[in-house]
Image (spheres, coloured by chain):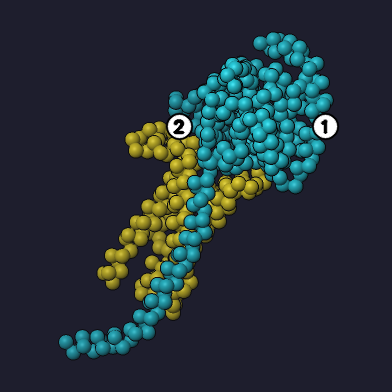
Amino acid sequence: MTTRNAAIPPVRYGYGLLMFLLALTGFAQMPIFKRYYIADIPGLGWLAMFHVTHYLHYIGAVLILGLAAYFVTAYVRTRPERPKLTPTGYLRAGLIGVILVTGLLLAAKNFPGYVFPPAAVILLDLAHLGSVFAFILTALYCWAFSKKWIDSPSKGDVKGVN
Amino acid sequence: MAIQLSRRSFLKGSLAAAGAVAATSAPAAAVKGAKGGRQLATLIDINKCIGCGACVEACRDANSEKYPEAKKPFPKMYPNRVPVEDWSDDQYASDRLTPYNWLFIQEAVVDVDGEERFLSVPRRCMHCVNPPCVKLCPWGAAQQYKNGISRIDKDICLGGSKCRKVCPWHIPQRQTGAGLYLELLPAFAGNGIMTKCDRCYDRVAEGGVPACIESCPEGAQIIGPRDEIVRKAHQLADETGGYIYGETENGGTNTLYVSPVPFKELNKAVDKGKGRPHFKPAENTMAKANNLVLGMAIAPIAGIAAAWGKQIVADNKKKEKPEHIDREGTDHDHA
């Protein structure tokens, strides 16, 4: 038990750090960090470099896609009893799903020759940004009220997912 | 200023009109021939341009209805560093790109085969094959059409000027005090609208050609499917000993130039700066990030494999576990 608990914080902190990187570089796609002096803070000048933040956002996307695939597979394959997601767990998973799908479509759009209808691009942009805002609010609520991802009547069952 | 321009326009008018009649029919056929998803490109033969400015005036005439309508006084913007960019009182400035001048003539004195020569170069949006202004616009206000035209929708643009920063030539120009941001939070977000050449998308959609091409009395500019234009650029460069710009710059653009001197020399000779784009090499700004998309395809496979493998290891351990627990438990009880 002690061993397992010791192994959780790095994953949790890694996940938190990754989500922070994605949110930061995602918001940096809007021209706000220079306007509001944040890029003037020593060491944060890169936040005003759109190609740099775009590249870092893609690196974060690679990691979150790998992580999401890992946890979904671990969840589906957990036996004998699959742990049950809490309502906030479902909500967070759903929002991450929307963020990933819209993000992948936006990444596909960035290839030469992939011309999406203007209305579709606007819809994707708004859906991506909107789901990020919703996820942040949900995550803050869950953090403030200690809401877990899964019901864990038997902690041994959730080892694969936690 | 307006009167001077009109007079100059009148003097050039007869020459331009004669050229236009001859130039219109062939490009129009090329535009129609490009339907079916092929990107249209233009080829500008710098040798032919005489710097008359007919294209600049035709562009203004064709697009003036699209120009920003600035409302004054401009709203106070916070913080104070947000720059006001106002060209509304200088709409006839024609020596650089502005929100009211989407095409200008860049001039250079160069050495061609030992002789000093004056070159005139029409400059406007390059209409990149994969335009970073469009692809990185956070709101979808900058758009690209299948025919290769990129344009900024002035009804949606908030004027953040990201498009100008990510453009290798910093083409888009901002007009403060116009557009959607006035209806939202003008003090805290946005700063007008960004503008640039839309290569007369509306005329092209109806089978016409951009006004600058139609008006050129020298036929310095042609339009057609990009592969054909690239072929013609090479043919022209071979025939004249010229140099090509735009074929590979920023991954390829839909505006190609053929110059009698290397573009390194031309770049040194032209007046560069705000609203006056360079002729330097331009690396493909979208390529690095797009290369990471392969990682986005591989990462989920790696994640699935890792979780699957871990589960198999766990299952195998479980199969061995009952005896192990039993033995340990028995030993423990005895102890």
Q: Secondary structure at mark 2?
A: loop
Q: Mark 2 — residue?
A: A35
The reply, left or right, for residue B259 in relation to residue A131 is right
Query: Residue B49 in the image: x percent, y percent?
Result: 68, 22
Q: Is residue B296 above or below residue B52?
A: below
Comparing marks 2 and 1, which lies closer to the viewer?
1
Q: Is residue B335 above or below residue A7?
A: below
Q: What is the spatial separation of the Cα atoms under label 2 and label 1, in whole angstroms?
A: 49 Å
Q: Mark 1 — residue?
A: B25
Q: What letter labels the chain drawn in cyan? A: B
Residue A50 visible within the image? yes
Residue at x 41% of width, y 49% of height: A21
The reply, left or right, for residue B162 in relation to residue B144 is left
Residue B155 visible within the image? no
Q: Quadrant of the C terminus of chain A?
A: bottom left
Residues at marks 2 and 1 on the same chain: no
Colour chain A appears in = yellow
Three-letter residue code for mark 2: Arg
